[in-house]
Structure formats: structure tokens, C-alpha cells
Amino acid sequence: MATTTSVKTRRYHRHPWRPLLIGLATVIAVFVFNEQHPAVFDLADLKASDLRMYVTRRPPLTGAVAIAAIDEKSVAELGHWPWPRSVEARLNDALRDYGAAAIGYDVLFSERDGDDIEAEQIAQRLKRRGVSDTAVQETLGTGNDAAFADAIRQQGSTFLGYAFEKHFDRASERAILESAVPTGFKTEQVAPPPLAFGMVRELPGPPPDLITARAYLPPIEVLNRAARGTGYVDVDHDSDGVLRSEIAVIRFGRRYCVPLYLALTAAYRGNAPLRLVIGPEGVRRLTLGDEEVPVDELGRMLINFRGPPGTFPAWSVADLIARRVPRAAIAGKIVLVGLTAHALGDRDVTPTAGDFPGVEVHANAIDNVLHGDFVRRSRVEGTAEEDAAALVLVLAISLAAAYLSPLWLALTALWAIAGFSAYAQYRLVDDGVLISVVLPLTAGLLTYMLQSTYLYFTEGRARLYLRNAFEHYLNPEVVASVVDDPQGLRLGGERRHLAILFSDIVNFTSRAERYEPERLVALLNSYMSEMSKVILDARGTLDKLMGDGIMAFWGAPNAIDNPARAAIDCALEMLERLKRLRQADERFADLDIGIGIATGDAIVGNLGSEHRFDYSAVGDTVNLAARLEGLTRHFQVHLLVNRQTLTEAAGGYCAREVGLVKVKGKAQLVPIVDVAGRAGNGIDPTFYERFNQALEHIRNGQATAANAVLATLSRESPDDALVSLYLEKIIEATDGQPTEMVFEFETK
């Protein structure tokens, strides 16, 4: 089980406060820019809001709104627009007969009918000729305006539209008030006055900044008195010229006037009362009956458009007057009368279309109120939530930059930005709240880009420098694990299954006595460079270089499939590389090495003190490998391994068992093996097979048979020290019948 010691370690970033400072500076810069140039973020957020609002499925229509369209067909049948008011009278009579619940005219009747004016001129001429008043009146009739007024009164629930001169708030109030009032507009409210909120509660405090008007263009008196009420049809476009909202209240004098779409909805709801609460910050609350109509502080209701033009049923005025429309299409509904013919104007740009009839905008607003599926957008509350989201995003990304790797920084930024986007969309779809996303996302993305750039030019370069520098001293895999995971820089270790390799130059001490120090160092550098490359190419962890000795292991810090086989293959390659060095460089002509490998469990990790430690391995397996390397001198072989190493390596080598050895510091006997090379690599395998056969004879108590085999091997290879040792062991046996070859050593 891994054990750790609590020590002070350096953070991955030497200065974690710097990314936090970058994040703070970024969010402040974004806030300041937004304060100085709000139109930039507003414009971007308007476009983003359009995309977010209309990617989801729109709710079905309530079916309570229909449009009486003044379209191309009506103009073709009824004549050029504007028509004589007698046409509107016939239309109103038709809608009454159809059973319309309420009628609203998105058309201005601020001037008298042209035919009526002409008729009055004729009457004056007749009077000058001496025609009696009775005869004149019989000739002229009642007049178009009067006929339309009479039709309005008989229908009983007809609302007329009017327009204000201009809208202004505190920013534009001075310039508008100093300009002249256009002809026809009235600064005083004529009787009956325009519809206003029945109950208005004004909270204490400074006067609010509301949409205000100083003059309006009412319907002519005869129509104004006949109508059930009048509502304004003004709209307000956003900074990009797109119409997204309806103005729910405009202050005119001391009255808070009602728009046509709310007047019609209130009438349809059985004269539901309209209430208004005004606070110092603006409109606090607007209700129609028991239902709250969400508006922003300026009193604007965001329209949740049902679709492109033509979404609402529209019937040609000509067809309505001619009774060619089914009664069910009109009965019990709110009917809006307005222009849809392209040549007549009254078209707007909306999020769903660039050429949208104005009358259908009002139809969408009415349907929103009736359905109750509002989209809420508040300047005050929305800004607070928007700023909070920006701060959270910047803080999360900055903390990731301060304490995590670049990869985790990227993932954190992705999760934070995607999470906020999903949250904002959830609020829109589920709660109907439109949160601005551009400023938080801009702050988050800008923070991530700046933090990534900072890490690239500072931490990235520092890591690259450290990696390049320390790879001269440490194993690259250890360097990578420490650089990528700063938690690796702590004392402690864990039990791992390793293959440990020790190698040493034979008779190096006597060689050092004969060589000049400079020559010796040059020889060692060349030798160590070659051997280190072999170990690293074999995916070994180069633990340490100890004078003429090398320690390496396999299985940590990165696990490999077969540590034992990798270690044996590396040792054989080291011997082969030394052979080539002897052939290429005369300095290596008489140089020889011994290698010992042991496989088993060991503790591996950062070992040492709090101030200096090394990534290394300790344990009984490490000690055994060191002892095996030393035994290569005694047995005069190049590579000794414990039997577990050869077993785990899974064959493919020419090897012979040496027997059991008892090394210093270890009570148990350890079976060891001499590995001569890979099978089929120019080595006679029969020699090693016969040696193993001789060892098997000894274990079976057949010393005579073993002696015969060993004698033959000695004649074939008189320099084989291990064969000679076996022959001596058999002769020295007290009973002449040894059953195991055991070697004991009291020195390292």
C-alpha cells in the first residue's frame, strides 16, 4: 500500500496569483467596455436572443385572434386606399353579423372622410343657390363618418387606434420638448380621452424613466365618441431596427395610456381590469385581471412571435364584406383590421421575417397575453444576473489556469461556457426568462484565450525548459509524469511489480588506476551514453548512474506488459552494443560488463528527504538484482537473473540454471539463471540443454551421470567457469552424491 509523507511542494504554476489577476483584469475591462459602449454588446445580444428564442418549437395559436386584411384583393375590389368610411361601416356591420367579440383598427382615423368634405362643399354651393336645408340634407345623406360611427356604436366593442407624436425618455426629452408639435397632433387629451390604466400605484421615490409622449393624433371626434375606447398602436424598435417588443404603457400627461392590443385583450377577458405599479426604477408590475404581464422597466413586453408572416388567419376585407368567410372563422374572436398589402406600407423587420405586417405584430402580442407564454427580459435584474454569470465564468477559468494543466484548463472553460449556455437556454425554455449571454460568454472566452496565451509564453516554455534540462539527469517518463502532475513531487512510494537491472564494468578500479582522469571520464561518458540510450529505447526507467554502474527498472512510473522480458532484452542489447563498441573503438577492446536482473515486488516513488529526493525503487528485489550483478564475476558470465525473471519473460532464450545461491543479507536460497542470449542468435542451444540435463542428474542423485556430461562439456569449452565449478562441487561433496548445487556468499 502506498505511503506518503506530508511535505511542502511547489505548485504547478510558480505564481498562481497571476492567472487570477489576469481574470480580474479581463472582467473589469469587459465591464468598463460595456459601460462605455453598451450598444456593442446590446446589438450582439439582440441577435443571439433571436437565435435562442426561435430554435425551439413554438406553441400553437390560441385561435382567438383573426385579421381582417386590407390586402391586394380588397384594394382591387373596393378601390384605392384609403376607402370612403362607408366601406369601414360595411366591414364593421359584417363583423358584427359574424359575431366578432371585439374589433380593433390598426388604422388611423385622424382626418375626416374625403367624400364627406367634398359633400360639405357641395352643400355650401347649393345653399348659396338658395336650396333649402332640408333638400340639401336629403341630397347629401348622413355622411360616411357618421355611417361608420353608427356602425361602431351598433357593434358595441370596437376599439380605434391612434398614434403618439414621438416617444422620449430622459436622454431625449430635452430635444423633443424643444421641437415644434406637428400639425394635427394635440398636446391636450380630447374627450373622451384615450384608454388608460384604471388603477395606478406610484411608489415613493424619484420620478421613473418611462416612455413618454407630449402629443397624440386622436381619431376624429365623431368616431372617438362612438368607439368603445381608443388605444395607441405605436411600436418601438431596438437599436438594430428590428421590432421585438410592444410598448405596454406610455405616459401622456398625467395618464398612463393603454395600447390597442391590451385594450382588446381586456375586453375579450370580460373587461378585466388593467393595473400598474410604478417605482423609482420604472414599471414594477403590470397586470390584466389576475394575470401579470411581464414588462421591463420601460414598460415593454417582449413578443414571443408565433412564426413568419401568415401564421395568423387573415381574411380579406372584400370577402368579409361580401360574406364569403365562414362564420366560425370570426365568431367569438378578436378581429384586428390592418394593412397587409405590400404597396400600402406598415411593414416591420422582426426576428422571424424581414417584411412583417404591422397588424400581425399586434396579433402576436394579443396571443401572447391570452396564452400566457411570455418571455421575460429585465434591464435591472437581467443585468445583475448577467454580471454575476460573467464573474463566475471568469473565476472558474482563472482558477483552472492557476492550478490545473492546459488540458484541464480547456476542459474547464468548455464545461463552464457550455454549462452557462445550457442554463441560460433552460431558463428561457422552462421559465420564460431571457438572460443575456453575450457579455458572460465574451468574458469567459476572452479570459480563456488570455490565460492560454499566458500559459503558453510562461508555463509552457518553463515546462519545456525543465523537461529538456532534467532529461539529462532523469528518465524522460519520470520527468513527464512530474511535469504533467505536480502532485508527483511529494515523498512517498507504492508497491509495484518491477524488473530491476544492475550493470557494472568489470575491474573498473584497476582500470581507473591506469587511466588519466580525463581519459577515464571520456571513456565513461561514451559508455554511459550508449548504455543509457539502450535502456531508454527499451522503455526502461533509468534510475541512476553510479560511477561505472547503472541501475534501471521496468514497470514504473508507467506500467508495461512484461517488465521481465523487457529487462532481459535490454540487457542482451547492452551486451551487443558493447560488442560493437569494442569493434569500433579501441578504448573498449578489453572492457567487459556484468548484468544482474531480479523481478518481484518493490517500493517505488520519491525517496529521500524533504529537501532532496529521487525517484527510485527499494526493497528486497532491488538488493537481489545488485547481488546478482556482483555474482557475474564469480561465475564468469555476463547476465544473471533470478528464476522468476526468466519464467515471467516466457521463453525464447538460451539459458541454463546456475543453482541456488545464498547472498549476503538474504536468508532464503534463490534459484538463479545464466542467460546467454536469444534463441537462434548464433548460440549453440545444445550446450545449455546438456548443462541443464547435468543439473537434473544431480537433483535426481545421479552424480556419476552428471559428472560424465560435465566432463564432456569441459572438454568442449574448457574456459567455461560454471562447468568447472560444478565438477569441483561434485568432487568436494562429502558423500559424492550432491542433490542440489548451492553457493553461499558472505560478500556483496
Image (cartoon, rainbow, N blue to C red):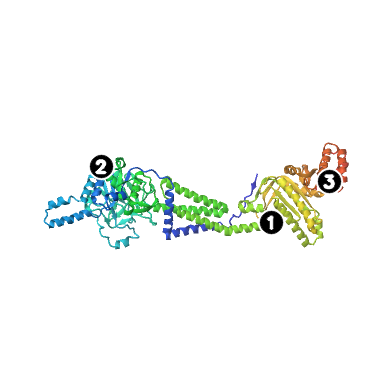
Camera-side mark, 1 or 2: 2
Q: Which residue is mark 3?
A: 722
Q: Is residue 163 shown above or below 714? A: below
> Neighbour class for label 2 at 10 Å: few (<14), some, many (≥20)?
some
Which numbered disc flags the more N-terminal residue, 1 or 3? 1
User: Which residue is at a point 25% across and 58% down the rendered structure image?
Assistant: 184
Viewer can see residue 38? no
Q: Amino acid at mark 1?
A: Tyr
User: Which residue is at a point 81% across and 45% down the rendered structure image?
Assistant: 684
The secondary structure type at the circle numbered 2 is helix
Q: Position of residue 671 (x, y in %)?
A: 78, 42
Disc 2 to disc 3, C-alpha distance: 123 Å
Please tell me the numbered disc located at residue 486. Answer: none
Viewer can see residue 214? yes
Q: Which residue is mark 1?
A: 473
Q: Does 130 sit left or right of 371 as displayed? A: left
Q: Amino acid at mark 2?
A: Asp
Q: Does 616 sit left or right of 235 as displayed? A: right
User: Which residue is at a point 57% across and 60% down the rendered structure image?
Assistant: 457
Which numbered disc flags the more N-terminal residue, 1 or 2? 2
Q: Is residue 650 shown above or below 488? A: above
